[in-house]
Image: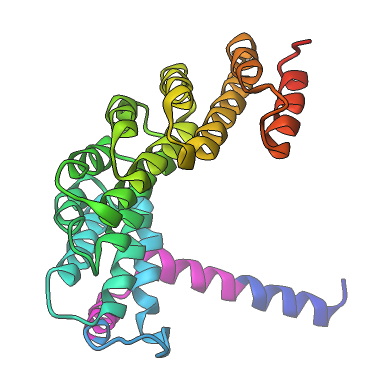
């Protein structure tokens, strides 16, 4: 390596060390300034002034106290008059570093028609079981699209404790709710979920037959992946038949092969 190349490599290493120091030791004044900028942040504006918040979040992996402080400050954004864009920013950051401490604030927003979507976005990604519990509790407190959203989020989390509550919703007169519940059960894909959607397939109204079939296929696929090939094969066989749509027949043939069934 020549002298010029060595100099460039040394400069690059120095830049990387400085950048790492900034990430690991965020400037408190810069973070304060970023939160001040967040108060008037609107969509389309330069996000550069908010960068110190992201840098500080990167540092929370090894600093529980800093994580708690940042989480508290982001939650405060959701409870004040700040623009929707600022709240969207806070929701997205909480989805990355939120803990059980975020759940009560987010849960209170699940019935808010303007903020429920992003509250669910964060709750879907917070690994603490309290997040799933909040979504389940909201099933009894919401209706229409807000309830459907909570169902979708539980399916996205593949939350097994939610199976009984979701199975009960298959009997709902609101077909959007019943369809969302069937789809969520398909994503969860446990034996209990499979039993619920198999029963639903037998009595689903005409408008939900396709959804019920897809949910059964999804459960069967999950069971194959879990090594429960006999249970999966039984589901595929129940879906076999010339009266099924082409995509179902193809999926059944492929599924039986994957399950090692004749």
Identity of the residue drawn at 18% across and 39% down: 137
Above-or-below relation of 254 to 49: above
Residue 225 x, y percent position in the rendering: 62, 24
* Quadrant position of residue 145: bottom left
Above-or-below relation of 58 to 220: below
- Residue 43 belongs to the span the image colors magenta: no
Q: Quadrant of the C terminus?
A: top right
Residue 259 x, y percent position in the rendering: 71, 16
Q: Quadrant of the N terminus?
A: bottom right
Q: Nearer the viewer, residue 30 or 170?
A: 170
Residues rendered magenta in the picture: 14-36
Residue 215 x, y percent position in the rendering: 52, 33
Q: How many marks?
A: 0
* Quadrant position of residue 196: top left
Residue 220 x, y percent position in the rendering: 59, 24
- Residue 32 belongs to the span the image colors magenta: yes
Identity of the residue drawn at 70% across and 26% down: 252
Q: Nearer the viewer, residue 226 or 48?
A: 226
Question: Magenta: predominant secondary structure element?
Answer: helix
- Asked if residue 50 can be seen in this view, the reply is yes
Q: Is residue 237 left or right of residue 196?
A: right
- Asked if residue 153 can be seen in this view, the reply is no
- Asked which colour scheme the image uses, the reply is rainbow
Above-or-below relation of 163 to 260: below
Q: Is residue 222 left or right of residue 75?
A: right
Q: Nearer the viewer, residue 1 or 170?
A: 170
Identity of the residue drawn at 14% across and 46% down: 141
């Amino acid at each position: 390596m020549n002298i010029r190349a060595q100099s460039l490599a040394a400069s690059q290493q120095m830049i990387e060390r400085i950048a790492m120091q900034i990430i690991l030791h965020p400037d408190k004044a810069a973070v304060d300034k970023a939160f001040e900028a967040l108060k008037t942040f609107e969509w389309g504006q330069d996000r550069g002034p908010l960068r110190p918040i992201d840098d500080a979040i990167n540092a929370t992996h090894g600093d529980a106290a800093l994580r708690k402080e940042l989480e508290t400050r982001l939650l405060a954004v959701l409870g004040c008059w700040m623009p929707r864009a600022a709240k969207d920013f806070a929701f997205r950051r909480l989805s990355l570093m939120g803990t059980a401490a975020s759940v009560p604030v987010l849960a209170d927003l699940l019935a808010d028609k303007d903020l429920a979507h992003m509250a669910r976005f964060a709750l879907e990604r917070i690994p603490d079981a309290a997040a799933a519990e909040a979504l389940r509790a909201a099933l009894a407190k919401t209706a229409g699209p807000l309830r459907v959203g909570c169902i979708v989020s539980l399916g996205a989390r593949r939350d097994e404790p939610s199976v009984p509550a979701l199975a009960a919703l298959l009997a709902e007169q609101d077909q959007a709710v019943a369809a969302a519940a069937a789809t969520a059960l398909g994503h969860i894909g446990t034996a209990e979920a499979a039993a619920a959607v198999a029963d639903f397939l037998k009595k689903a109204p005409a408008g939900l037959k396709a959804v019920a079939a897809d949910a059964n296929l999804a459960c069967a696929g999950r069971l194959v992946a879990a090594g429960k090939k006999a249970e999966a094969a039984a589901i595929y066989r129940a879906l076999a038949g010339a009266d099924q749509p082409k995509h179902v027949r193809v999926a059944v043939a492929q599924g039986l092969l994957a399950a090692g069934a004749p």
